[in-house]
Amino acid sequence: MAETLKKRHSIARIELANITKQYPGCLANDSVSLTLMPGEIHALLGENGAGKSTLVKTIYGVVAPDSGDILWDGKAVEIKSPSKARELGIGMVFQHFSLFETLTVSQNIELCLSKTQLTSIDNLSHKISELSTKYGLNVDPSRYVHSLSIGERQRVEIMRCLVQSVKLLILDEPTSVLTPQEVSGLFVVLRTLAKEGCSILFISHKLHEVTEICQQATILRAGKVIATCEPARETPATIAKMMVGELAEQDAGYSKKEGRHTLFTVNALNLTTKQPFGTGLKNINFELKAGEILGIAGVAGNGQDELMAIISGEDERNTGHALSLEEQSIGQLSAGQRRKLGMAYVPEERLGRGAVPDMSLTENTLLTHSQGFIKKGLVQWQPLKEYANKLIAQYKVKCHGEFSEAKSLSGGNLQKFIMGREIGQNPKVLICAHPTWGVDVGAALAIHQALLALRDQGAAILLVSEDIDELFLLADRMAAVCDGHLSPVVKTADTSIDQIGQWMAGTFISTPAHHTEETTA
Ligand SMILES: Nc1ncnc2c1ncn2[C@@H]1O[C@H](COP(=O)(O)OP(=O)(O)OP(=O)(O)O)[C@@H](O)[C@H]1O
């Protein structure tokens, strides 16, 4: 395939030669070279902190390389800013979306168009609807961004690039929060774009997706290109070996456990949504037992955010007796009071809600670990720093030290840190969204093992995720949410991806008495 592409197009769409970027104390890119042909889907792979985001930010004009050359359609260019990148025809969808929540889809897209681009488009909303139909993106130009699920926001970001007629589309971890159906949908879009000659640079930790969709792959380790390959000729295991230097342990076969006594109960929880286009919760009932992992699957935007926020206390509305921890009603308690009772929480959005970007890792630790580290009103900085360093070492978080600001960490490393911080509280109940979002294969394994160890110590864990494979791997019991309803809760061993997939689509809702209590499949 790569040869065919090269024969058909002798000029590369983009050629990077010896790109080097040094951060204080960290050589993020070390003489990296990479070539992308028109219509090629190319994977950029490597463990957390390998330098992938730095490289793509260089292409997009966000990061200025210290040295190296970039050729665009055969000509040397300097990409000094994202607007220059966009002018060339480079579009990028970041891991952390950069949309304004209070503006509509159309207004958000308008903001990133140059005057020339705007004048060339007669009616932007019409154009968005047209492209939406052409590529099957299902993006409504008049919707407010705050009302959109993560999957929908991603499609807006892609739309933003399509409106600008991109020639190179860069996607940083595009599938980490998508459902299997959304991933298939995205792949259809990417294949169509590639057929039309658009080049795609695709960062992913999901290696089976890389073998499915990419024609070429470049693998980075510690800032250097250590291998290139044609993914279709490899297996996820052989690619993992190139990335992390050793074969990742097989994913299958974590043992399933029966929960013991009930620790946390949600009883007839009904809640209107605060968001104009959010999803209210409708008669949710379930029990979370000590020593079990309960997985909740669902397409983003079906009430997961509302459920997480009300359980954690981030949504401060008093739910009366609908929520209880060890038979004590917690509906009236603040998020902090709930934490003191032994609840911990990993939100979906790591930068901003999981961690404060401008604070150091130590300060971010204090945010949820205040109990042990404040004495007589004074912060015990030394033990706190030592503790943050312990988390860094234990979860192999690549950073300069406990003083590093959260925003300076690569996405996967920050996720490892937040997971470690919350698991480290030894909570009775851990509520967790997307535990391994953006985390490389080796680190995902470490997080899985930490979650299983926490479960085996007797904690009750609620995993809310769109990654159905991971839920099947980790959860002892499972359910799905759809339109604010919760399906029956069943043992994972008694269900199938097919059944959960159907529940995600809401097939259980018409059942007259779906009280969402324990049933056996
Ligand atoms: N602004 C910054 N200041 C200091 N160091 C940084 C900065 N940005 C990135 N780094 C460091 O550069 C290295 C490469 O980071 P990068 O984000 O490129 O990795 P990555 O391969 O994309 O990782 P991930 O898979 O976790 O997203 C990391 O060690 C990171 O801590």
Image: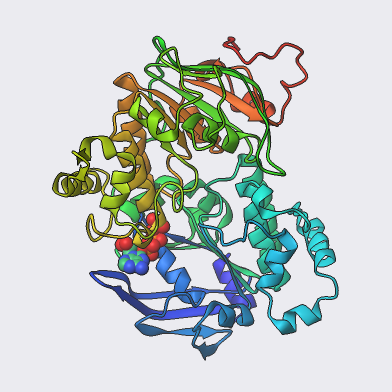
Left or right of 294 in this view: 336 = left
Quadrant where the image shows the N terminus: bottom right
**Residue 121, quarter of picture:** bottom right
* Above or below for 108 versus 254: below
Is residue 247 among the parts visible in the rendering?
A: no
Q: Give the residue at x 35% y 84%.
A: 67
Would residue 260 appear left or right of 126 to someone viewing this image?
left
- In the rendered view of the protein, which quadrant contains the C terminus? top right
- Seen as rendered, the residue at the extreme front is 376
Q: Where in the figure is residue 98, as x and y percent of width and height? A: 57, 62
Going by the image, does 170 lie left or right of 299? left
Residue ID at (47%, 41%): 347
All told, the count of numbered labels is 0
Q: Which residue is at the front of the view, 352 or 45?
A: 352
Comparing 170 with 496, the one in front is 170
State whether residue 164 is above or below residue 317. Answer: below
Q: Is residue 18 left or right of residue 509?
A: left
Residue 231 location (% of width, % of height): 49, 56
- Residue placed at 56% from the left, 58% from the top? 97
Residue at 82 percent of width and 60 percent of height: 129
Taking 344 as reference, is 111 above or below it? below
Task: Tell me which colouring the rendered structure shows.
Answer: rainbow
Q: Residue furthest bottom?
A: 76
Q: Where residue 189 sits in the image (x, y, percent)?
A: 69, 57
The x and y percentages for residue 49 are 34, 59
Write down which quadrant ligand 1 falls in. Answer: bottom left
- Is any part of residue 92 visible from this angle? yes
The quadrant in which residue 266 appears is top right
